[in-house]
Image: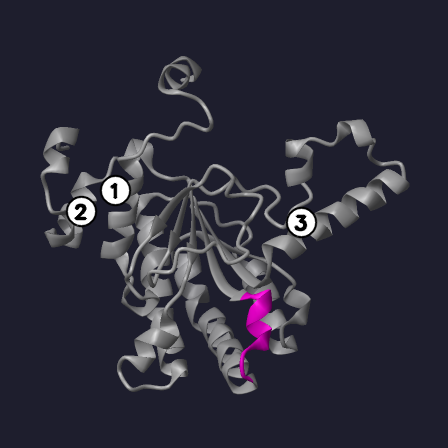
Amino acid sequence: MLIEEEKENINLEALSTEELMGLIDRDRLPRHIAIIMDGNGRWARSRGLPRIAGHREGIKSVRDVVTGCREIGVKVLTIYAFSAENWKRPEFEVNALMMFLEEYLQKELKTLMDNNIRFMTIGQTDKLPGSVQRWIQKVMKETENNSDMTLNVALSYGGRTEIVDAVRLIARDITEGRLLPQDINSKAFSGYLHTKGLPDPDLMIRTSGETRISNFLLWQIAYTELYFTRTLWPDFRRHNLLLAILDYQNRERRFGMVEGEISRAN
């Protein structure tokens, strides 16, 4: 393992994927990575192709990043596959996205099982087509005992809607006597979110050069490290993932504290 001073003098982007793997500190991995997969349309447009071609190419990136996270040792990967706002897109594009999602579930179930990856979703999946819902349930059921990694896919998801849903559930439990108002705190609130049981993301990646959160995991990313790259999602592969993790490992996470307090807390 290279010392930190030597790493700073290396052009990481010029290194091979294998060389980057050798620089990863396995003791300082982000436990949970969240990704906003952006740029499929621009990737297709730059090649004179329909937007759907970008979405199809983006599936290859999903496969490579999922297996890459599993190989590295990341425990949770959450990908923003379809937002609540995406329903506003042209009908033919939404239909194509639903078709690609169903194809992915059908084709990747074996990969998930072979890699001991659990599959789960967050969002209003009841709004998805019936055939997609059935495949989601099938893959969730067959992978529920897998334990090496969790692949969490955000579908028909919006961060504000998730928080409003949590507030409604809390109000219901208070009304029905299962919860006292004085017992509400950050930990209790997190238990009402779609991500209940998952750790908050340590690292959030957004591709394509955009620097917005886009209504993604608004509560959960309070202290998440943010990484923005100009790479379009269909071009984002394991090599790019490693660059993001190395950038993360070069940061000091303070959680509102100063350096001396971090040392004492650790």
Disc 3 + disc 1, Cβ < 8 Å: no
| Residue drawn at (31%, 66%) of the image | 232
User: Quadrant location of residue 44?
Assistant: bottom left
User: Quadrant location of residue 1?
Assistant: top left
Instruction: Where is residue 239? Give x, y as percent.
Output: 22, 55
Q: Is residue 3 visible?
A: no
Question: Per the image, is 176 magenta?
Answer: no
| Residue drawn at (44%, 48%) of the image | 149
Q: Name the residue under label 1.
A: 246
Q: Mark 3 points at which residue?
A: 163
Instruction: Indicate whether 157 appears above or below 194.
Output: below
Instruction: Where is residue 210? Give x, y as percent.
Output: 38, 60
Q: In this view, does 180 lie to the left or right of 184?
A: right
| Residue drawn at (18%, 40%) of the image | 23
Q: Disc 2 versus disc 1: distance between alpha carbons?
A: 8 Å
Question: Per the image, is 88 magenta?
Answer: yes
Give the amino acid type for the residue marked by disc 3 in the picture.
Ile
Mark 2 or 3, nearer chain start: 2
Give the amino acid type for the residue marked by disc 1 in the picture.
Leu
Magenta region, residue range: 83-90
Q: Is residue 143 left or right of residue 25?
A: right
